[in-house]
Image (cartoon, rainbow, N blue to C red):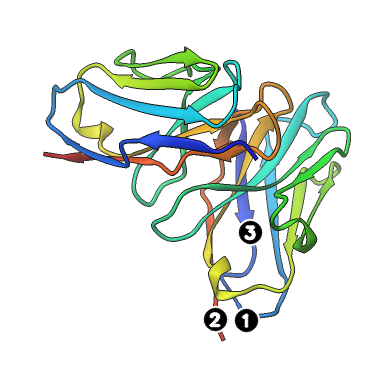
């Protein structure tokens, strides 16, 4: 059974850097095809895929946010770390991590999500 | 980026109704199309993958169809636990993109 859980701050100030950790079990990022994605959802709005990382360290970022994002993996700890720089109130959202496979690319399952508020 | 457009954005229906949601892609995506259900305050749940394959544990009243640029999600007989928001997602290319969601409300 695959499970994922997000952890990190619930409140960040404008211009600060957000760092979130996804701790997972039930699969390994050493296994061919495996991946983890970060997806966010502003309150009342739609889902947006921010970043993906795969077993071979292939990384994909949202083009519109690429300059602000970094995703890394620690296979020994079964963790994926996501950072977003220069946070702004419009980045207030629930941030989810989810298991994915490179092809065919759906997300399943998802972590419970963590609400991050950007406010001074 | 591939734009995913869902219609309608919201709908009101009664228990037992047949409900159909449409998702259109801005370019062909073969069958790299997946559907999720999100109950308020919860994480999304995968319902259907590869356009028409039901995820394990999902009731058979849910079905999906389509290929290319046009896809549908159908709930054959709406149940109380189906009132939620539904999203489509393409995985043909990165960035992976989602539709804007369809909220299914109680009439």
Between the C-alphas of marks 2 and 1, the distance is 5 Å
Give the residue displayed 78% in from the left and 32% down from the top.
Answer: A28
Quadrant that contains the C terminus of chain A: bottom right
Looking at this view, is A120 or A20 the one in front? A120
- What residue is shown at x 20% (from left), y 20% (from top)? B18
The dot on residue A111 is: none
Position above or below: A92 against B62: below
SS class, disc 1: loop
* C-beta proximity under 8 Å, tags 3 and 2: no
- Among the two numbered marks 3 and 1 on one chain, the one whose residue lies closer to the N terminus: 3
Q: Which residue is mark 1?
A: A13
Q: Quadrant of residue A87?
A: bottom right
Q: Is residue A103 above or below residue A36?
A: above
Which sits earlier in the primary sequence, circle 2 or circle 1? 1
Tell me the residue that label 3 is attached to. Answer: A7
Q: Which residue is mark 2?
A: A119
Q: Earlier in the sequence, mark 3 or mark 2?
A: 3
Q: Badge 2: few (under 14), some or many (20 or more) residues near its Cα, within 10 Å?
A: some
Counting from the top left corner in percent of width and height, residue B49 is at 53, 20
Q: Chain of mark 3?
A: A
Please tell me how crowded label 1 is: few (under 14), some (14-19), or many (20+) other residues with Cα within 10 Å: some
Q: Could you tell me which quadrant the N terminus of chain A lies in?
A: top right
Pointer 1 chain: A
Q: Say what secondary structure mark 2 lies in.
A: loop
Q: Chain of mark 2?
A: A
Closer-to-camera residue (A77/A108): A108
């Amino acid at each position: 059974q695959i499970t994922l859980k997000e952890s990190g701050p619930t409140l960040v100030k404008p211009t600060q850097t957000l760092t979130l950790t996804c701790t997972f079990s039930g699969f390994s990022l050493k296994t061919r095809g495996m991946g983890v994605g970060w997806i966010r959802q502003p309150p009342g709005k739609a889902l947006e895929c921010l970043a993906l990382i795969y077993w071979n360290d292939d990384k994909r970022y949202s083009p519109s946010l690429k300059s602000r994002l970094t995703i890394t993996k620690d296979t020994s700890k079964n963790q994926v770390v996501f950072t977003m720089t220069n946070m702004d109130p419009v980045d207030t959202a629930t941030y989810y991590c989810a298991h994915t496979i490179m092809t065919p690319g759906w997300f399943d399952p998802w972590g419970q999500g963590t609400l991050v508020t950007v406010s001074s | 980026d591939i734009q995913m457009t869902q219609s309608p954005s919201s709908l009101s229906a009664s228990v037992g109704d047949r409900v159909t949601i449409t998702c259109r892609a801005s370019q062909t995506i073969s069958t790299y199309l997946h559907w999720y259900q999100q109950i308020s305050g919860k994480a999304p749940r995968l319902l259907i993958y590869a356009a028409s394959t039901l995820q394990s544990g999902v009731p058979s009243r849910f079905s999906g169809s389509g290929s290319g640029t046009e896809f549908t999600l159908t709930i054959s007989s709406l149940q109380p636990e189906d009132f939620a928001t539904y999203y489509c997602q393409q995985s043909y290319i990165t960035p992976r993109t989602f539709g804007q969601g369809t909220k299914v409300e109680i009439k």
